[in-house]
Image (cartoon, grey):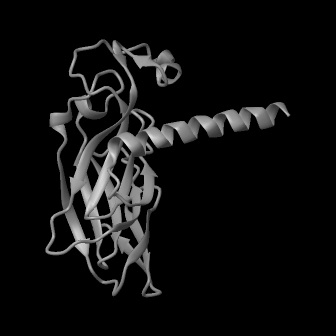
Amino acid sequence: SGSRARKNSFDNKLDREQRKLLDTQLNQNTKIFCISWNKSKWEFPTFCVGANNNRIFIYGYTNTNNKNNNIVNKKMERAQTLTQIGNCMKTWNCIEKIVIKTRGKFDVRGIDWANHMARKDHLIAAGCSDGYIRVIKITRNQNRFNKGDCINPNTFKWNVMWENNIHTSAVWRVKWNITSTSLLSAGDDGKVYLWKKR
């Protein structure tokens, strides 16, 4: 019974957090299709959300104040993630809305945030309803993702570094390998493609 009570308490907490994210930061015209975590252990918890109308939302467990703060003791970082880091109180915030400009509208049906493996950039693969696979590159800015500082929302830089429309219909699933050097995609055309980074 104790484990059941703990599970119910956790579920209720997740439900409240989910309502907070969707009700306060997304409007009623937004449709959500997919989500993926940033897998880095050395940055603020962040995840991306694939939506309709060419949009990807980036959420971070951050404070958007741009203040100078001392980096906290590394042994305390994990324990303080849910309360505060430095002088900043942390909450879930939509830190960026990516709108991919094309001739037509599409939905982001599949999404995967790559392991960054000490690269200078983050990579997000998106499978889209117009048959395209798109890879978005996000500049890794230490003031943007570092655990010891508050976030400056004006330092976010991204671009579509690659796209391909080999699928003849909607792409529903994309998945990086563990080193982020290969990408799988699958769609309504019944085909699976393996992409290798050159």
- The x, y position of residue 54, in whole percent, is 25, 64
Q: Residue at x 44, y 55 (%)?
A: 35
Q: Residue 92 or 135: which is nearer the viewer?
A: 92
* Quarter of the picture holding the N terminus: top right
* Quarter of the picture holding the C terminus: bottom left
As drawn, 104 above or below 158: below
Q: Tally the numbered discs.
A: 0
Q: Residue at x 34, y 48 (%)?
A: 26
- The x, y position of residue 40, in whole percent, is 42, 40
Q: Residue at x 35, y 54 (%)?
A: 28
Task: Give the quarter of the image for residue 61.
Answer: top left
As drawn, 52 above or below 9: below
Q: Residue 156 or 72: which is nearer the viewer?
A: 156
Give the left or right position of residue 190, taking residue 166 as reference: right
Q: Residue at x 36, y 47 (%)?
A: 116
- The x, y position of residue 66, in whole percent, is 20, 22
Task: Give the quarter of the image for residue 8.
Answer: top right
- The x, y position of residue 129, in whole percent, is 34, 75
Seen as rendered, the residue at the extreme front is 28
As drawn, 127 above or below 111: below
